[in-house]
Image: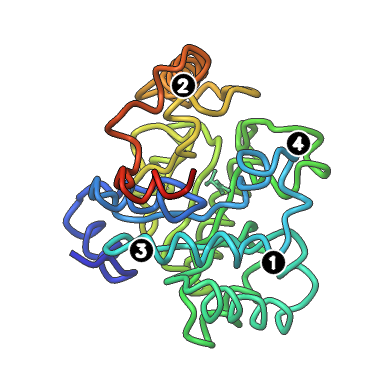
Amino acid sequence: MKNSVVTFKEMKEKNEKITMLTAYDYSTAKLVDAAGINSILVGDSLGNVMLGYEDTVSVTMEDMIHHGAAVARGAKDALVIIDMPFMSYQTSTYDAVVNAGRLMKEGRAGAVKLEGGVEMADVIKGITRASIPVCAHIGLTPQSVNAFGGYKVQGKSLEAAKKLIEDAHAVEDAGAFAVVLECVPAALAEKITKELKIPTIGIGAGAGTDGQVLVYADMLAMFSDYKPKFVKQFANMSEQMINAFKAYDDEVKAGTYPAQEHTYAISDDILSKLY
Ligand code: KIV
């Protein structure tokens, strides 16, 4: 079944949980799609996971379009959401609409995601007016790491919790079709989820949200630079990949790979004429 922003709305109404995973390339997108995951996020976590940056600040529009288009080619049923990178929407609503349009036209996204609450309401309105669905992202917004002074749980004080609730309503009122809540106390995320008509997608926000998102390389234990508390490793692909790479190394060096079945034949007749 092809997932769209309407699917998200219907799933919230029916109280069905929405699943989302990141992917950054064609082959991974095909696997995530085949598993029946509702949505693939081409997150700007691409910067950390795929490009080896220490944060998402350096990720460019070109990076997002390049990887987004690859994911879109691999995703048959999942809704592909592409992140708007740092400084592609903060400068003006005009820039935001132009760049969101590029992610749709060149990246073949079904929706875009951007970080920020009240302060991004006008930008969200501008993009949605151009018929581009927007997923908002509040709580811990990694593009603001330099303003936050690190990656910290958000909404813990009374003032911060009230601001987060305000942000959630502001992005809904501005026209966002969903909102990611990152690193938010579970009870607060649940309260926001009950107050909003649009679905909430949690990451480090407990089980009371309408859906969950994880970085695929985190949940497969492929990314080992750090492991946030909220990550559950559903498989240990690092171990499996390293073992496979070692087996290849051993077999090539021992001369057992490639074997007969991996080689192409030529007739003896032709071969004899070469000497
Ligand atoms: O970039 C990303 O992968 C994200 C998720 C962590 C929500 O924004």
Is ligand 1 within 8 Å of the beta carbon of the residue shown at mark 2? no
Residue 54 tag number: 4
Name which quarter of the figure residue 65 lies in.
Answer: bottom right
Q: Position of residue 61 (x, y in %)?
A: 69, 66
Asked whether disc 4 touches disc 1, contact meaning CB atoms under 8 Å apart, the reply is no
Across and down, in percent, residue 116 comes to 65, 58
The three-letter amino acid code for the residue at tag 1 is Met
Question: Is residue 259 or residue 244 the one in the foreground?
Answer: 259
Which residue is at a point 47% across and 24% down the rendered structure image?
221
Residue beneath disc 2: 248
Q: How many marks?
A: 4
Which of the two discs, 3 and 2, sits closer to the camera?
2
The CA span between labels 3 and 2 is: 36 Å
In this rendered view, identify the residue nearer to me: 83 or 268. 268
Q: Quick one: label 4, few (<14), some, or many (20+) residues within 10 Å? A: few
Which quadrant would residue 255 be assigned to in this image?
top left
Residue of label 3: 79
> Rounded to the nearest whole Å, what is the CA distance between mark 4 and mark 1?
18 Å
Distance in Å between CA atoms under marks 1 and 2: 37 Å
Q: Amino acid at mark 3?
A: Leu
Residue 262 lies, in percent from the top left, at 33, 35
Using the image, tell me which numbered label, if any, was put on residue 88.
none
Mark 3 vs 4, N-terminal side:
4
Mark 2 secondary-structure assignment: helix
Q: Check disc 1 and report the residue beneath it.
A: 61
Q: Amino acid at mark 4?
A: Glu
Say which amino acid is labelled 2: Tyr
